[in-house]
Amino acid sequence: MTSFASLHLVEPLLLALHDEGYTSPTPIQTQAIPPLLAGHDLLGCARTGTGKTAAFALPILQRLFSTKHAAPKKSARVLVVVPTRELASQVAESFTTYGRRLHPRVAVIFGGVGQSPQVRAMERGVDVLVATPGRLLDLMQQGFVRLDGVETLVLDEADQMLDLGFLPDVKRILAAVPKRRQTLLFSATMPKPIEELAGRILNQPQKIFVTPTASTVELVQQRVQYLHKDAKPQVLTQMLRDPAVRRVLVFTRTKRGCDKVAKRLNQDGIPAQAIHGNKSQGNREKSLAGFRAGKIRVLVATDIAARGIDVDDITHVVNYEIPNVPETYVHRIGRTARAGAEGMAISLCASDERDFVRDIERLIKRSIQVIGPPPGEQPRATSTAGARNGSRPAGGQPAGNRRGPARPQRQQGGRPQRSTGARPQQGGRPQGGGGRGAGQGQFHTRDSRSAARIEVRPETRNEEKQTTFGVGV
């Protein structure tokens, strides 16, 4: 079995890994660390929970250690660009944890908070800067940040960083960093057009595809339940009353839908918190910290929580609304079954979402097990007024107040977003915990002529707006 020592990591890094309880590297770490230590550009793809953060953080820290010199003022030697604030904080924490005996200067920049502490952190220059694009470009325009000292550039969640929503900002960042640099791209999914685009910004890169890049962890049990959309609130409440659902992440497509689901759960006696782009950064951090600490059992989220967020012991992921981009499903359910644990992913599918499920099954190359009635016998909602006053019928489910069937509710999450492009073609963490989790399968490509709908920048006000991506730089 490969060990971290066999990858020629320096003693301070090996000690830090030992302190964290990591014993052996995952496949993406085993294959990525040697070429990164040698200074190569790299395109790395491996499914969620396989330790991609450690795969690039460890060799970067070693290269910083082996070539010690101060970063220019207001600049950084290493720049890591990520799509969300939560992921920025997590990646910065990983660099600090792995580098605790090397003492790197690490700064994090993202929007939603005051800029003064970030400006002060950059005054003397830093070894590692982790940033979201919007605030980074804002501080550059104000003259508080420069990128002329960057030796290594990392685009984490590269497929999202290179979609149309982020691409203009990424192009501005690429224009500001030195041409002679090491560039790394990491992601769990890599559609063919994005892979082709990535090739234009890398210099003779090493390409590492560990298992199918759009595959899902075998330890995630995947289920789909077909039902009428107005029955979703009741079915979700019933599901969450099960004591076996100990820590659950519920995904919606929109911010409005996220708030409605969290409100309904609280009305039904199930404490839940909502997290999305319209929440203040303090609120988002508090909710995520409470969820990570086990103080919050149910977190309802938009896809800002789908990528890279590492919370131990999430037993269930529920797709309250099926994502209309199949790669997003892979990222969502990757929040459970991390670091060798088991997990369950349940998707609640209304009739207008069936095509999304078929797209997902084509992408992951497997069928998702159906639970509950078959599609032709979908359950409808019944009155739940009794759930609010505590009455229950036999069987433990909330009772109605005998006023007849409830009025069908409007679709959770509001009106579906309109796509301007053609429909898509259908077709970590070191072992022992930590990082971004471990895992394997076959790269799924798409016709490069098709356009896929992708999420736009989570740090903007239009966080869940959807658009199409192109392949031109």
Image (cartoon, helix red, strand yellow):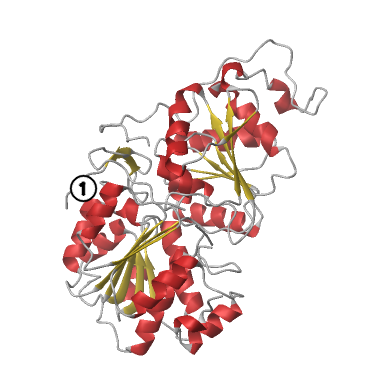
Image label count: 1
Rendered position, 446 above or below 112: above
**Along the line of sight, which residue is nearer the eye, 214 or 270?**
214
Residue at x-position 51% and y-position 49%: 216
Quadrant housing the N terminus: bottom right
Asked whether residue 100 is in view, the answer is no
Residue at x-position 43% and y-position 37%: 362
Numbered disc 1: secondary structure: loop
**Along the line of sight, which residue is nearer the eye, 169 or 432?**
432
Give the residue type at disc 1.
Val
Q: Is residue 47 left or right of residue 399?
A: left
Asked whether residue 133 is in view, the answer is yes
Can you identify the residue that label 1 sits on?
Answer: 471
Identity of the residue furthest to the right in this view: 394
Residue at x-position 56% and y-position 16%: 408
Q: Residue 352 appears at what percent x and percent y?
A: 45, 23
Q: Residue 176 appears at what percent x and percent y?
A: 18, 67
Q: Residue 56 appears at what percent x and percent y?
A: 40, 71
Q: Residue 136 appears at what percent x and percent y?
A: 28, 62
Rendered position, 88 above or below 297: below
The picture quadrant where one finds residue 344 is top right
**Along the line of sight, which residue is nearer the eye, 361 or 381?**
361
**Along the line of sight, which residue is nearer the eye, 308 or 461?**
308
The picture quadrant where one finds residue 417 is top left
Residue at x-position 23% and y-position 54%: 197
Identity of the residue furthest to the top in this view: 404
Q: Residues within 10 Å of mark 1 (few under 14, many from 20)?
A: some
